[in-house]
Amino acid sequence: MTPLLEVRALRKHFPLHSGLLRREIGAVRALDGVSLDLAPGETLGIVGESGCGKTTLGRLVLRLIEPTSGTIRFAGDDLLALDGEPLRRKRREMQLIFQDPFGSLNPRLRVGAIVGEGLAVHGLARGAELRARVIRVLERVGLRADVCDRYPHEFSGGQRQRIGIARALAVEPRLIVADEPVSALDVSIQAQIVNLLQDLQDELGMAYLFIAHDLRVVEHISHRVAIMYLGRIVESADSRQLYANPRHPYTRALLSAVPELDPNARRERIALRGEVPSPIHPPSGCRFHPRCAFAEPRCRSEEPTLLGRADHRVACHVFPV
């Protein structure tokens, strides 16, 4: 199947400046050579600690920020070659669900105006037709038609996130970047939102780039999972394969910290030593080697490549697939 989204060797370095003359003294290497594919109707989970580059990746894919280098192809088009009106038209096919349902909705606008803004901007509907489409999409996410005339502050966190999902759905996108869409919600509400996203995908056939740090949520919703560490993907695999047979020591440590639902289950906890290195001065070789209990001399000098089978790839000298 031809990928809907193709990312190759994507990098984003944020320059650091100092002094009155704003002289560049270095760069934060937020993303450093990420490649991935996403098929139509597929969910790719992106997992990692805070600061690993997950959100930067999502914003680069949507062209909300510009990359330092690399390529992004969406539906066969070179996204980085588009500008102006062609880019605006392409953005209709790519939408974003934000992490914070409290800060991502304009408090001065009624819900109908928030959800219908994309329809108006892209000239898809006006007047009574626009309102009718807004009501349909609100009902699709489990909200009543009368919410159109109310303001965001009148709703709970879960309801606000449903409004955010409706806003993304209104323009009928092919790709949705969901940036930690449930992390600010109560656990019971998280399950409702995740189930809603799955139902919408089954019904509408959208692809999700699902960014999260909760491995249980990612396991539930994702077809494939990519584990990121310090700006790079260290392991990617089909969801079941990754959870059943993690290879990279970092992936194993993350999975060991996931709470077990079975009180009788026993799982060895893997405590990582030290702190995450600075993305300004990342370690040489494998970036995980200062915290890895299995590191060899080769790991300190030679950067591992993401290798393996189509359904499971890992960047590790010690535990290859």
Image (cartoon, rainbow, N blue to C red):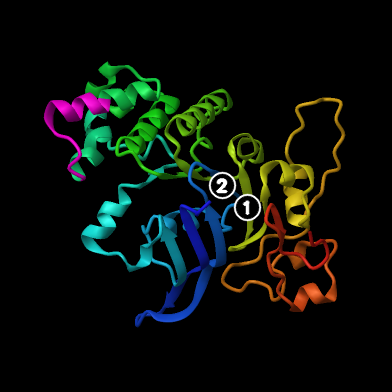
Q: Is 294 rendered above or below residue 104? A: below
Which residue is farthest front? 1
Tell me if residue 55 is in the magenta stretch: no
Left or right of 108 on screen, residue 14: right
Q: Is 28 rendered above or below residue 254? A: below
Which residue is farthest left? 127
- Say if residue 53 shows up in the picture: no
* Helix, strand or loop under label 2: strand
- Say if residue 176 shows up in the picture: yes
Residue for badge 1: 226
Res 79 → quadrant: bottom left
Res 147 → quadrant: top left
Residue type at numbered disc 2: Leu
* Helix, strand or loop under label 1: strand
Residue type at numbered disc 1: Ala
Residue for badge 2: 44
In the image, the segment drawn in magenta is 122-134
Res 230 → quadrant: bottom right
